[in-house]
Every structure is written in structure tokens, then in C-alpha cells.
Image (tube, rainbow, N blue to C red):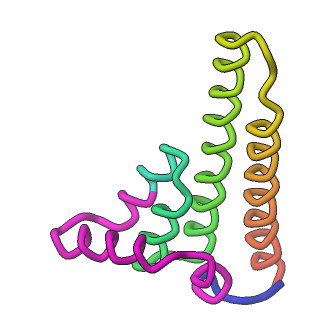
Amino acid sequence: MSGSFVELYHPLLKEVFLKLAREQLAQGAEGLTCADAYAEQGKPDFTLAYLLLTESTEDVKRAIFARSYERRAELSEQKADEFSQRFHRSFPMIQTEAQKDRTVAQQIRQRMDTSIEE
């Protein structure tokens, strides 16, 4: 399970997200602040783009990246609940996607724990 943050997660990202992040950074945006803001919005792709272009520790990057997936799961579950109330039926696919996001976050955090042990 070893590998740097960049080695592990760069292949997951589409170039368009990196391009947008580079543009914002060139205009003076602070990378870690942007990554944190996108994590809070539940946007892992944007979060990852800024994390890949920002200097910080591996653990900080993993924590923010994991939080982006956890937040997206929370937002998805809220949306599923709202839709259930509005349309009087369940939305299991949204719940399934939220569970997948929680699993990804857990895997990212496990890599954090592994790097501490090494």
C-alpha cells in the first residue's frame, strides 16, 4: 500500500481539473485553502487537483482528500432524504453512491494510517 500521494491519486484525475486549478493558482489562489474549500463542498476532483499542485505533508493531503469524499456522501444522503420526502419514494442509487464515497474515504484514511506505521 505504499506510494506517494501523487503516485496513488494523480492517475484518477482528468486533466481539465488540473488546468482549472493551475489557472486559479496562477491568479494567486492559495492551493491548500482551495482544496479545503472544495472538500467542504464535497467535490473530490477539484480537491485532488489543488492537492496535487500544492506543497504539504502526505497526511494533510490525504485527510483533506478523504474529507471531500465524506462530505460528498453526506450531501448525497441529504439529497436522497429530500427527494424521498418530496417524491414519496426511496432513492437507493443515491444511497449506494454515498456508501461508495464513504468506502473511498476510508481507504484513503487507511493509507494515512499505513504511512504512519512505516
- The vertical placement of 18 against 84, above or below, is below
As for residue 23 lying within the magenta part, the answer is: yes
- The vertical placement of 20 against 72, above or below, is below
Q: Which of 39 and 32 lies nearest the eye of the viewer?
A: 39
As for residue 67 lying within the magenta part, the answer is: no
Q: Picture quarter containing residue 13? A: bottom right
Q: Which of 94 and 43 lies nearest the eye of the viewer?
A: 94
Q: Overall secondary structure of the magenta stretch?
A: helix
Q: Picture quarter containing residue 1? A: bottom right
- The vertical placement of 103 against 53, above or below, is above
Q: Residue at x 69, y 42 (%)?
A: 73
Q: Report if residue 90 is visible in the image.
A: yes
Place of residue 30 in the rendered image (x, y in percent of width and height, measured from the top left): 29, 65
Place of residue 74 in the rendered image (x, y in percent of width and height, measured from the top left): 66, 36
Q: Residue at x 78, y 88 (%)?
A: 2
Quadrant placement of the C terminus? bottom right
The single residue placed furthest to the left in the displayed view is 27
Q: Left or right: where does residue 58 sit relative to residue 92?
A: left
> In this picture, which residue range is highlighted in magenta?
6-35
Place of residue 104 in the rendered image (x, y in percent of width and height, measured from the top left): 76, 60
Q: Left or right: where does residue 54 sit relative to residue 8?
A: left
Q: Left or right: where does residue 51 sit relative to residue 20?
A: right
Place of residue 7 in the rendered image (x, y in percent of width and height, measured from the top left): 63, 89
Q: Report if residue 54 is visible in the image.
A: no
**Number of disc labels:** 0
Q: Picture quarter containing residue 85? A: top right
Q: Residue at x 45, y 71 (%)?
A: 49
Q: Which of 12 and 5 lies nearest the eye of the viewer?
A: 12
